[in-house]
Structures are given as C-alpha cells and as structure tokens.
Amino acid sequence: MDLDAYVAEHEPQWRRLDQLARGRHLSAAEVDELVSLYQRTSTHLSVVRTRSPDPALVARLSRLVLIARTRVTADSGGSWTGVVSFFTTGFPRAVYQAAPWWGTVAVLFCALTGFLMWWVAGHPDSARLLVGDRAAAQLAESSFAGYYTQYAAPSFAVQLWTHNAWLAAQCLAAGILVVPVLYLLWANALNIGVTGGVMISYDRADVFFGLITPHGLLELTGVFVAAGVGLRVGGAWISPPAHLRRGRAVAEAGLSGVVVALGLVGLFAVSGLIEAFVTPAPWPTWVRIGIGATAWLAFLGYVVVCGARRPGSPDRRPRPDRPVTADRAT
C-alpha cells in the first residue's frame, strides 16, 4: 500500500473529524457526520495497522479515534439531544405510523358509543334496567356535573392522570392478546354511551356534552392511540408483514408501544389538567370547549407535522457520508 497516497486521500476526513470532535455545540447533521467519520477513521486505523504500521500515523489516528469516541459516547449519554429527538421525532412518528390502527379504533368506538346513546335515550326502559330510575334521575340532576367538582382540582388532576395512564398501559401491555383491549374499549364505550343516553333522555344533553367535550377530545384520543398501538402488536403476532419474521415484527411493534407509552404520559397530564381546571370552570361553554379543542388540534397537528417529517426508522435515513465498501478495502 502506498502510505503517502493513502494519507493524502483521507487527510481531509481526518481533519474534519478532529474539528468536529473538538467542537462545543454540534447540530444534528454534524453529529451524524461525526459518527460517520469516526467509523471511517476507525477503519483507516485498522488498515494502517495491518498493511503499513507506521508508528507516527498509528499514534495520530489512535489519538483521533479516542477523542472522537469520547465525544460520541458523551453526546449520546450526557446531553439533551436524545430527549429533544424523542419529542420531536420518536414519539410523533410512532403515533403517526400507527394512525391506521388507532384511527380505526376511534371511528368504531365513536360509532358504538353514539349508538348506545341513541338507544338508551330512545328507550327509557333500557336506562331503568341498566342504572335504575333513582340513579338515572340523580345522575341527570346532580351527580354527573358534581363529579367534576367533588375533589380539589390539583389532587383531581393527579388522580385523572394516573387513571388514564394506567388504562393506556393496560391497552399497550395486553395488546398482543387482543381480547383484553377490546374489553377495555367496550367498558368505556358502554359507560359513556349509557351516561350520555341518560342525560339526553332527561333533556340534559347540553350539560353532558358541555362537560365531557373539553377534556374528552384529548383524553379519548390518548386512549385510542394506546389501544390502536396495542392492537398493532397483536396484529404483528397474528399476521406479521411478509418481509419480517413473527418475532421481529412483534419486537418492532412492541418497541413502538414503549415509545408511545412514554409520550402518552405527557398527553394525559395535559388532559388531566384540562378536566380538573377547565371542565368545571364557571366560564361559557364555548370557551371551555374551545380550550379543549385547541389542545386536541395542537396534538393532532404535532403528530402530523413532526411524525410525517422523517418517515421510517433513523437507520434507513439516507446518509451520503456513510463509509462505503471500497473505503474499507483500500
């Protein structure tokens, strides 16, 4: 191997790696470049050691690789880059990719809940059978609205947060079994449908929708996402994609579920705050619904914009500066 020619060919890459490794603040593109050049220079060091072990060059490249490795490991473990990447790319992309699943869940859930409301409202005997005359009258007159004011708002928000997060965790964890997720969705649809039907039958539809809509838009969307991603895991087990083996398909869907579970913690915190502080507030109904709708639309916009920006996994993003086979064989 002509050592002088080899050095002349790769010297610009080594200088650039040294510059990046010593830089203080790197952009995302520069971090990618740093990792790529680190991998290339490690290959160059191996080639020099094997074919032309010049002591000075080996020492120089060893030092450069050590500095770059220290910077790479420090960046991956000690900075906020990973946290920012999770909220700007990881979580919204996982939700966006699972949209066909949770979108289907949302449509079917709303259709079933609407049917139950219509049936209970149009058949008073069914309301008496399901909840009893006295309980139905009490629900319409006071207990439904009173539910949102019976606890202090801060403790109520925490209670709602933990309850919804636990429900989402159940959907995600039981997704591979499918049936438990369907049962949880049915139980919630039945609760909302019967309650709404009773309120409508007592001419309290304005109270019902005025109280449930501000927080329900965001809260139920979080439940739909959790259920859809959970069912996606079950779908990967029942019918894995043709290009993946069953175990690999389930592992990828499960990893996406973990990402979604972490992100939904924040979503349910926001919905809990809205339910505890906005839903029972003595404001006009349109103001309370407007706040809830704004939060809901903001979440959907966040998922669409950030989730669609970088489709596919990071490993499949094009990187022109990745080392090529010819580089390794030089």
Image: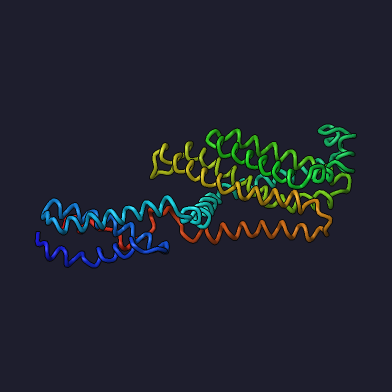
Q: Residue at x 67, y 40 (%)?
A: 163
- Whether 192 is drawn above or below 65: the answer is above
Tell me the quarter of the image containing the N terminus. bottom left
Q: Residue at x 63, y 38 (%)?
A: 166
Report which quarter residue 122 is drawn in.
Answer: top right
Report which quarter residue 126 is drawn in.
Answer: top right
Tell me the quarter of the image containing the C terminus. bottom left
Q: Is residue 1 left or right of residue 231?
A: left
Way the structure is coloured: rainbow
Across and down, in percent, residue 319 comes to 34, 61
Across and down, in percent, residue 38 comes to 29, 56
Q: Is residue 219 left or right of residue 289?
A: left
Q: Which residue is drawn at 37% across and 51% down?
A: 73
Residue in the foreground of this view, choosing between 296 and 270: 270
- Whether 65 is drawn above or below 146: the answer is below
Across and down, in percent, residue 121 comes to 83, 43
Q: Residue at x 48, y 55 (%)?
A: 80
